[in-house]
Amino acid sequence: MSLRHALSVAALALACVAPMPAQAAPKDAVVREHSGNRVSENLPAIAPALLERLDRYQNTRGASLGGWTGDGCLLIATRFAETQQAHRVCEPLGMREQLTFHREPLNSLYAAPKPLDGFVFGKDVGGNEFWQLHWFDLTTRETALLTDGKARNQDPRFSRDGQQLAYSSTARNGRDIDVWVMDFATRKARAVVTEGGTWSAADFSPDGRQLLVIKYVSASETYPGLVDLDTGKLQLFPVDGGQAAISDFRFSKDGKAVYYVSNEVLDGKPQEFATLRRHEPASGKFEVLSAGIPWDVGNLSLSEDGRHLLFVSNEDGIGKLHVLSLPGHKEVALPALPVGTIGGAEFSPDGRRIALSINTATSPSDVYVIELAAKRLVRWTRSEVGGLDSSRFVAPTLIRYPTFDRVDGQPRTIPAFYYRPALVPAGTKLPVVIQIHGGPEAQSQPTFSANAQFLANELGVAMLVPNVRGSAGYGRTYLGLDNAEKREDSVKDIGALLDWIGAQPELDAQRVGVYGGSYGGYMVLASLMHYSDRIRAGVDVVGISDFSTFLTHTESYRRDLRRAEYGDERVPEMKAVFDRISPLRNAGKIRAPLFVAQGRNDPRVPYTEAEQIVKAVRGNGAPVWFLMFDDEGHGFHKKANTDYFGAAMMTFWQQHLIGGQ
């Protein structure tokens, strides 16, 4: 590292400290500003030097797969202006032709099969997640609304001939998520599953007369079924062991067998990981196809010609692609892939190629194509990295640290990804940001993060990204270790990480910050509640501040889903647990500086969760910043908003982590 660059990092680390007023405002004073689409309280001006350095990092972007179009082109989603829109690419590294130009970002991008020529996409308003499905016709370049304009609609899936479109919707009563099927020629739709709860369509039978469906209760409890579309009869399949996580239902090409992913009991033994399975109902034949992989698998897809299937294994957070030939299920040799995560994979209509999105820690998501016969990997998109030198990006290492409890007599270990700055002077003790994922049944993986790269390369800050107990990807037992009354055990895992940081000579245990969104926001508040003497500052984005108020006010279609994970606040014993662990009810213990950011239209964690914790923590003597966007929901998706929040967060770290007292 050159002396000039070392001085540059040090100067930038102090750049936002200088503008602080000589005398702080009273601790209970609130400086409120309403500017355009955002409300802020107590946020200082952002230093121009920081904005200039951030600009290139904030102009990185990725591309994700939406499927193959009928002419052999690829449908992708990427952002060139303010929001993510649909594009088409027709050759490797070819021009990205933008197809949609909406103010709101698109989701559920789904290419239609032949003879249709177009795709379905979802779009909401201001992040409210009441998505409406639209049809984009590639021939006429016209867009048509498919759904009612009011309900929440998601997860579209075409029949093989394109004549029917299945999707999930709250249109019937606003509370339950039913499965609907639309005659695509007439655009008339009917509800085919109205049993209550949360349902989704998995796959049409080859003749289009049956539909595989799944009822979702929680990350560890789902129920499969089959709908006869002629009679409307729903048949639920038995679940071995009574309860399991089942997903990725697909018919074989001849319709005689079903492929699926499950962690059901096998031979009387509970299964830790989800495996790929095949079942023939008529003959009773049953096979486990991924028994040799001691990790969860998913992302199942079958080729239309019936010659291959693919799936992805999640191995310590890294995605590994597998292709099997049919009918023998022999492993097919593949070219080497970049080490990262696989966000989607789909066979071309002729079955000869596989398109997939790959995201790595040092490269944003891009779309590649595997040519099966040639065993060749071809890159189809090369997304921008803001003109930065990507060779300087930091790749994390996987560490495991001991926590408070034991397994088979040995300390339980928690996996975490460690982003360590490379360009810092020898002997420097690094400040640390701990980033905690949401869910809680999500999983942090080594994907590209502009924030992590900026912290490492420009501010000299290390980042640790743990998968505390309750995270997916590490087995059934691990997933359930934080359920209900065990909720704070995951917070103890953060305490154990603080111990690990204190034992590392290159890390500064006196300068540790915590950052997280949604359930990760709760984890930030809970960590500050328990460890304010060991944590310098925290950033809570759309976080839960009290489980009882959260469950009372989250959208009705989500309430029972969240009760299955967190517990039922209507049960007195569970309510007592919620009261005990509530950051809101323990706000007096939060003494470190706090930054709370929120979307006004959030249907998952209502904005009142943010407002009440900000109000409660004020008066403790530490600064509390508050930022809310009027045109966002659960997280921030418009570039101007994400840029402003990112700059505000870096300013917060500058003042209260790197340069704070």
Image (spheres, rainbow, N blue to C red):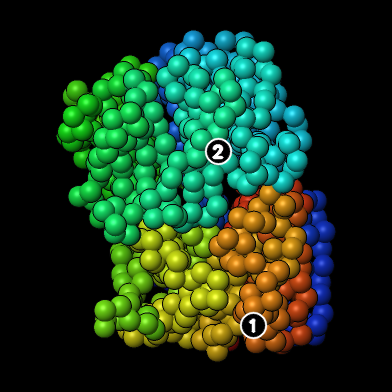
Q: Secondary structure at mark 1?
A: helix
Of residues 333 and 16, the one drawn nearer to the viewer in this rendering:
333
Q: What's the residue at 61%, 59% (across, down)?
A: 562
The quarter of the picture where the N terminus appears is: bottom left
Q: What's the residue at 21%, 40% (across, down)?
A: 336
Q: Secondary structure at mark 2?
A: strand
Residue 657 shows up from this direction: no
Residue flagged by tag 1: what amino acid is it?
Arg
Of callouts 1 and 2, which one flags the residue occurring earlier in the amino acid sequence?
A: 2
Label 1 packing within 10 angstroms: few (<14), some (14-19), many (20+): few
Q: Which residue is at the far front?
A: 283
Q: What's the residue at 76%, 68% (across, down)?
A: 611
Distance from label 1 to label 2 (Cα)?
36 Å
The quarter of the picture where residue 41 lies is: bottom right
Residue 591, image x and y in percent? 64, 86
Q: What's the residue at 75%, 55% (across, down)?
A: 600
Establish if 438 lies above or below 387: below
The quarter of the picture where residue 174 lies is: top right
Establish if 522 lies above or below 355: below
Establish if 658 lies above or below 318: below
Residue flagged by tag 2: what amino acid is it?
Ser
Residue 369, image x and y in percent? 32, 29
Q: Is residue 523 left or right of residue 46?
A: left
Residue 184, image x and y in percent? 61, 16
Q: Is residue 348 left or right of residue 205?
A: left
Give residue 139's mark.
none
Q: Which residue is mark 2?
A: 200
Q: Which residue is mark 1?
A: 580
